[in-house]
Every structure is written in C-alpha cells, then in structure tokens.
Image: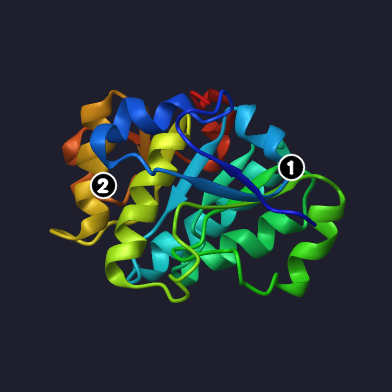
C-alpha cells in the first residue's frame, strides 16, 4: 500500500493542525491507509503509562462501548492501556487512526493491522521525518498534541499529576475542545473535564 504525503500548501492538509498548533504545526504529514477517515469526527484516547487498576477496568469497558457505538477513535496507542483499547477496537468495524511517535516510512506494518487496512477502516499517520525510527519522550509528547489537534473531542482515562498528559489536558481545554475523563480521575475533573462512562457514550461531542 502506497504512502501519501501532505504539506500545508495541499488542500487536503488538516486545518486543525495550523489552528491549534500554530507555528508547531508539522511541515508534512505521511499517511498509510484510508485518508478519508480524517474527514470523520473522531475521539482521541489517552492514558498515562502509570494508571490505577480501577481506571484500567473502566477504560476497557469504555473502549467496548465505543466499539459497539461505532465511534471513530484515534491515538498513539502507546501506553499499555491505550494498546489494550486498540486491541478491543480492532475487533469492531469503526474507523481507527493510529499515530506512532516515529516515522512510518520504513516501519513494518503490524500483522494485526492488515485486515483493518484491507477493509479501509484504518489509517496510519505520522508527522516525523524518515530518519526518526524510534519513539522518544519528546516525539511522544508532540505526537499526542498532534492527535489532540486532529480529534473532535478528547478522552483521557488517567493523567499522572504534573505529567505531560496533564499538560495536554490543559492545552485541550484552552483550545476549547471537549475533554472527557473517568469519574475517578479527580485531577482532570478539577481542570474542567467532563466525566464519562459507558452509558454516556451517546452524549459524546464528536
């Protein structure tokens, strides 16, 4: 499957990147898969690497609810909780956008992605140059801002206090985007996020 490259001068370049990232907007983005998924309203999923067990269970339930509701989702799917959500979502039929914190130009596509790619419901997206072959703390932080900028709404299962994920929550709220979290994530709720559980998925602003 061929890669597609877009730059800010291209009509298909997502306007949200320049709107929310301003001077930090990537000079190019590279796609593999169905680019039309970017036109859909999507929910970004995030979770800190460290996550309480109660939040993990609730997030699994939420991912199953998103799958049942067919809500398009996007993430780096990097932390263990995020990867578990991806496993759940790949069993469904809704569109998914995966954004690695590295280049996809020389990346070996995981075998688990093949069926979703063939079905036209998966898109791999990266803003990193071909030489960036490994994820770092810095590339992951930038990737998460890019995902949040592209998404219609953002869900953060857990953000460690004073972490880059908590800072991302503050950025999303400053952008005026809907931010959701679990009822047990008190620090994110205190910032102004809306509580979300599986029974409220139909209320998502995305």
Q: Answer with left or right where residue 154 lies relative to residue 194.
A: right
Residue 158 at x, y = what percent? 33, 56
Which image quarter holds the N terminus? bottom right
Residue drawn at x 45%, y 71% as measured from the top left? 131
**Residue count near mark 1 (Cα–Cα under 10 Å), binned few <14, some 14–19, many ≥20:** some
Count of picture labels:
2
Q: Who is closer to the viewer here, 130 or 193?
A: 130
Q: Residue 34 got which mark? A: 1
- Residue 47 shown left or right of residue 189 in the figure: right
Mark 1 or mark 2, which is nearer to you? 1
Label placed on residue 15: none
Give how far apart the Cα atoms at labels 1 and 2 are.
Answer: 27 Å
Q: Quadrant of residue 162?
A: bottom left
SS assignment at label 2: helix
Residue at 52% of width from left, 38% of height from top?
Answer: 43
Looking at the image, can residue 29 be seen?
yes
Q: Give how far across and how far down residue 179 sits, in percent.
A: 35, 34
Residue 182 appears in the figure? no
- The residue most toward the left is 162
Secondary structure category for the residue under label 1? loop
Viewer-nearest residue: 189 or 113: 113
| Colour scheme of the picture | rainbow
Residue shown at 29%/36% (left/top)? 21
Taking the image as shown, residue 89 lies to the left or right of residue 117, namely left
In the displayed orientation, state which residue is furthest to the front.
9
Mark 2 burial class by Cα count in 10 Å: few <14, some 14-19, many 20+: some
Whichever of callouts 1 and 2 sits on the residue coming sooner in the sequence is: 1
- Cβ–Cβ under 8 Å for marks 1 and 2: no
Residue at mark 2: 168
- Tell me residue 147's x, y (percent): 44, 45
Q: Position of residue 196 (x, y in %)?
A: 43, 38
- Above or below residue 123? Residue 1 is below
């Amino acid at each position: 499957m061929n890669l597609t490259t877009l730059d800010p001068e291209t009509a298909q370049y997502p306007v949200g990147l320049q709107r929310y990232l301003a001077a930090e907007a990537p000079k190019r983005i590279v796609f593999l898969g169905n680019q039309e998924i970017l036109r859909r309203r999507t929910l970004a999923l995030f979770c800190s690497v460290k996550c309480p067990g109660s939040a993990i269970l609730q997030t699994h339930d939420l991912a199953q609810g998103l799958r049942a509701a067919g809500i398009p989702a996007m993430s780096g799917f990097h932390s263990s909780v995020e990867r578990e959500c991806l496993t759940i979502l790949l069993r469904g039929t809704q569109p998914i956008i995966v954004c690695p914190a590295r280049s996809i130009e020389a990346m070996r596509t995981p075998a688990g992605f093949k069926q979703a790619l063939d079905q036209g419901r998966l898109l791999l997206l990266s803003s990193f140059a071909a030489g960036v072959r490994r994820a770092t703390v810095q590339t992951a932080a930038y990737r998460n801002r890019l995902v949040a900028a592209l998404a219609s709404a953002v869900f953060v299962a857990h953000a460690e206090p004073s972490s880059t994920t908590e800072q991302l929550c503050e950025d999303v709220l400053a952008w005026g985007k809907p931010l959701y979290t679990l009822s047990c994530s008190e620090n994110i709720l205190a910032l102004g996020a809306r509580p979300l559980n599986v029974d409220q998925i139909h209320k998502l602003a995305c």
